[in-house]
Every structure is written in structure tokens, then in C-alpha cells.
Image: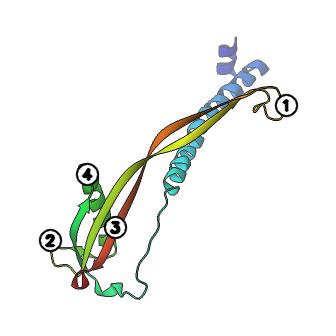
Amino acid sequence: MIVKSLVAGDNQIGWRANCRLRLMEVFVKMRYQVALPALLACAFLAFAAADVSVDYNHQADFGRYHTYSWLGANASGLWKDRIMAAVDSQLSAKGWQKVPSGGDATVSAVGYSTERDKMETFYDGFPGWGWRGWGGMGVATTTAIPERVGDLTVDVFDSGTK
């Protein structure tokens, strides 16, 4: 009956079913339209949480530097290539040219990582803590989760004054 009325469009039940189908289509489309930007926003916030600090000589005349060469990058295998490629792309965007040796500036990168423990505590008991007589005894479980933390230092200095 509903299928017939959807095709014919002649009664109230068919119209309502047709509206429900259209609403379901809209919600399915909207789910993807909302989920993708939300996922991208979460990824942006995760990368924006990185702590980046910059220090440089404010009296330096960066207009006189047009070429650079690498002194080296102290990192393991794949990371060394990624670090050098990222620095190369940023410096070329500023108009600097990479030369094999003897550039106006010399670039050096040193990276290291360490492991530290992140402490997470879970409280159990009613209403949640068992603190000062609220709900009796509660249990607190603390877990140490190892977490790798890294630092990368990129030095750009005048080749003539090293």
C-alpha cells in the first residue's frame, strides 16, 4: 500500500512515508557533511597542540641571505630525510636556494626523543570518589602509560661567522 501510494502520491500515508524517506536521505548526507569537518577540526587541534618556540637575532639582516647549505641533520633514517625536506621547502618558499656547500647560511638540525610516563587515574565508587563519607569506600587505580616526547632544533647561522 505504501509503495503504491508513493508512486501515485494520492493519500496521506504515502506522503508521510515519502517525507520520512527524504528526511532519512538528508540525515545520511548531513552525517557525512558534519563528520568530515569535525574530524578535520580534531586533527587540526591535535597538530596545533604542538609546542613550537622560535628564537633568532632580531638585528640580523636576513635580506642578505640567498643561498644555504646543510651541515647535517642528526636524526634516524627516514626522519632525517623528512626533516631536511620540510626545511628545504620552507626556505625555498622564502626565496633561498640550496647549494651543496658554501652557502650564505648553514643549516643544522638536531632531533632527539625521550620516553616519559603519563599518569592516568581512574576513580571507582559511588558517587565517584568515596571521599569524606560520600558513598563509602572508593578505589583509585593509577596507571603509568609510557609516552614518547621529541624535540627538534633547527639552527640557521651565517656561514662566514661559524
Please report the residue visible at 50 percent of the width from the left and 38 percent of the height from the top. 145
Closer to the N terminus: mark 4 or mark 1?
4
Towards the viewer: 56 or 95: 56
Q: Earlier in the sequence, mark 1 or mark 2?
A: 2
Going by the numbered disc 1, the residue's amino acid type is: Gly
Q: CB under 8 Å between callouts 3 and 2?
A: no
Q: Are marks 1 and 3 in contact (CB under 8 Å)?
A: no
- Spatial CA distance of label 3 from label 4 is 15 Å
Where residue 37 appears, as percent x and y from the top left, is: 55, 47
The residues tagged by marks 1 and 2 sit, at their Cα atoms, a distance apart of 72 Å
Most foreground residue, 84 or 138: 138
Label 3, on which residue?
Answer: 154
Residue type for callout 2: Pro
| 66 or 18, nearer to the observer | 66
Element carrying mark 4: loop
Dividing the picture into quadrants, the one containing residue 26 is top right
Q: Which residue is mark 4?
A: 76
Q: Residue at x 50, y 48 (%)?
A: 43
Q: Label 2, on which residue?
A: 100
The image shows residue 66, relative to residue 30, as above or below, that is below
Which residue is denoted by mark 1 in the rendering?
Answer: 133
